Image (spheres, rainbow, N blue to C red):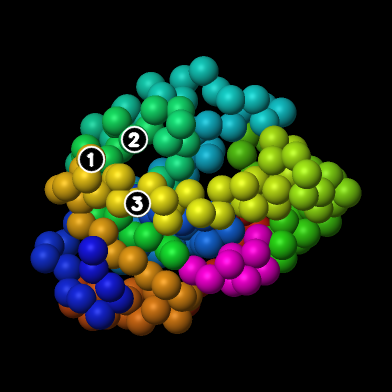
Amino acid sequence: MLSADDPLPLRPERVLIAGVTGSGKTTLARRVAEMWDLRHVEIDGLFHGENWTPRESFIDDVRAFAAEDRWVTEWQYTSKGTDAILAPRAQLVIWLDYPWPVVRARLLRRTLRRSIMRTEMYNGNVEKPIWQVLSTRDPARSILAWQTKTRRFWTTQMPLKRERFPHLIIVRLRHPRETERWLHDQAGASGVSIAPPKRRSRDR
């Protein structure tokens, strides 16, 4: 497993971004897509249909873009079968393994902003009312509760993923400052410039 200071052995063409909800996977995916000229597929947009109903075509849509040569997406919905499709095709995994206070504060700010602004996200869906998203009891209804439930998912699962998919290059980034430094170094190695992160209400 590589750190922020280790050079990459190749310039990847297919990238997965891993991390707990609220770590900034989608924001980073956009920036990686721009830096390496990859197609960013926001996997939440493939999964969520109208009224937050799972789309029946989800797995077929994942298979379709995974078969392409160049892409970056968030490593999510592993319980829905995405591992068997995405991981064998991916070359690089960027793991955002940030401290709990960082990801909790990020998710809280983002969720409150989206709820108050009624920001449209995927296929006409908007964030749930504040009273519901602030609940910490039901992971199926509150994204904060979901974050709490899954906060250690990648800590426990990443060693298993490494064994199952030994071809994957994994970069573990432990703080947003490390991520910025890593991006700057990769951009320099690729001969491109990168813009600072943009605040987006639906970032993951």
| Residue 63 belongs to the span the image colors magenta | no
Residue 60 lies, in percent from the top left, at 38, 22
Label at residue 158: 3
Q: CA distance from mark 1 to mark 3?
A: 10 Å
Tag 1 near tag 2, CB within 8 Å: yes
Residue underneath mark 1: 164
The boundaries of the magenta stretch are 98-107
Which badge, 1 or 3, is on the more N-terminal residue? 3
Foreground disc of the pair 2, 3: 3
Compared with 175, 202 (above or below) is above
Q: Is residue 193 visible?
A: no
Residue 74 lies, in percent from the top left, at 42, 48
What secondary structure characterizes most of the magenta part? helix
Number of callouts = 3
Residue underneath mark 2: 83
Residue drawn at (88%, 49%) of the image: 131
